[in-house]
Amino acid sequence: MSGPQLGLAISVFLACAVEAVEALTIVLAVGITRSWRWALTGVAAAVAALAVIVAALGPALDAIPINALRVVVGALLLVFGLQWLRKAVLRASGLKAQRDEAKAFVAESDAARAAGLAGAGFDGYAFTIAFKGVLLEGLEVAFIVLTFGSSQHDIGLAAIAAGVAIAAVIAAGVAIRAPLARVPENAMKFAVGVMLTSFGVFWGAEGAGANWPGGDAALLVLVPGVLLVALGLVQWLRRAAMSPAVGRPA
């Protein structure tokens, strides 16, 4: 397996694991609190919708010339990666609360109880919340798989990495029937943000005609470089937040 392929597999695995953990929390909350039957029906409907979306977009992406595709994908990954990295940097610096799956589970469960009791028939609340949660998180998974896979002409590898991540999260959720609060989700988001940003810069510039010194080996410099910049921002924000002269940034 080449360096870019390994980076693709790791990035997709981590990103999809994070999305799967968040979707699992939502499904567990409505399933335990209200109705497993209709929560799982909502999950099945969301998976079917995602399958249609992926089936429609996959061939369309393959038809785009590789250089144009890498410019578009690079720009999308850069925007997407910077959003993840921004949140991760703010959380690591203490300016944004860390995501806590246990608290998220309690909040979802409270909302499910507040929605009122379901009758013996269709539970619209459980179905809708499970459907929406899986669909929204799944769209991010599909985006990552399609963009990474298309840029490397290896959608199969990206799909395998995503499938392994999702299967691992589901297996853990079934085993403990509780949110995966101990998963280092925030650290994983930091790593994913770094990887998405790095690959976005690499593929975007390559698609625009730039020749990276050393070719794919440039990623061995680019990824650590983005990581060092992000860690530097964390330290700077921590000091800025603690400085009475500067005050806490808005």
Image (spheres, rainbow, N blue to C red):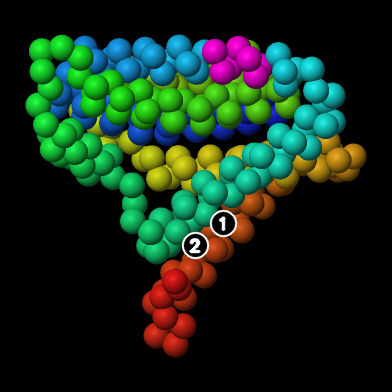
Across and down, in percent, residue 101 comes to 28, 39
Across and down, in percent, residue 233 comes to 54, 63
User: What SS does tag 1 mark?
Assistant: helix
Query: In the rendered image of this protein, does residue 53 appear above or below residue 141?
Result: above
Label 1 CA crowd tier, 10 Å (few <14, some 14–19, many 20+): many
Query: In which quadrant of the rendered view does residue 152 lie?
Result: top right
Residue 56 within the magenta-colored segment of the rendering: yes
> Quarter of the image containing the C terminus?
bottom left
Cα gap from disc 2 to disc 1, whole angstroms = 6 Å
- Visible residue check, residue 19: yes
Across and down, in percent, residue 141 comes to 51, 27
Residue at 84% across, 24% down: 65
> Quarter of the image containing the N terminus?
top right
Tell me whether the residue at label 2 lies in contact with that at label 1, contact meaning CB atoms closer than 8 angstroms.
yes
- Which residue occupies the foreground of this view, 204 or 169? 204
Residue 79 left/right relative to 250: right
Q: Which residue is mark 2?
A: 234
Residue at 35% across, 33% down: 22
Residue 192 within the magenta-colored segment of the rendering: no
Query: In which quadrant of the rendered view does residue 206 lie?
Result: top right
Q: Give the label on residue 176, or none.
A: none
Residue sitting farthest toward the bottom = 245
Q: Give the label on residue 230, or none.
A: 1
- Which residue occupies the foreground of this view, 157 or 34? 34
Across and down, in percent, residue 76 comes to 66, 39
Q: Amino acid at mark 1?
A: Ala
Which span is picked out in magenta?
Answer: 52-58
- Visible residue check, residue 1: no
- Which residue occupies the foreground of this view, 107 or 162? 107
Please name the predominant secondary structure of the magenta segment in the image.
helix
Q: Amino acid at mark 2?
A: Val
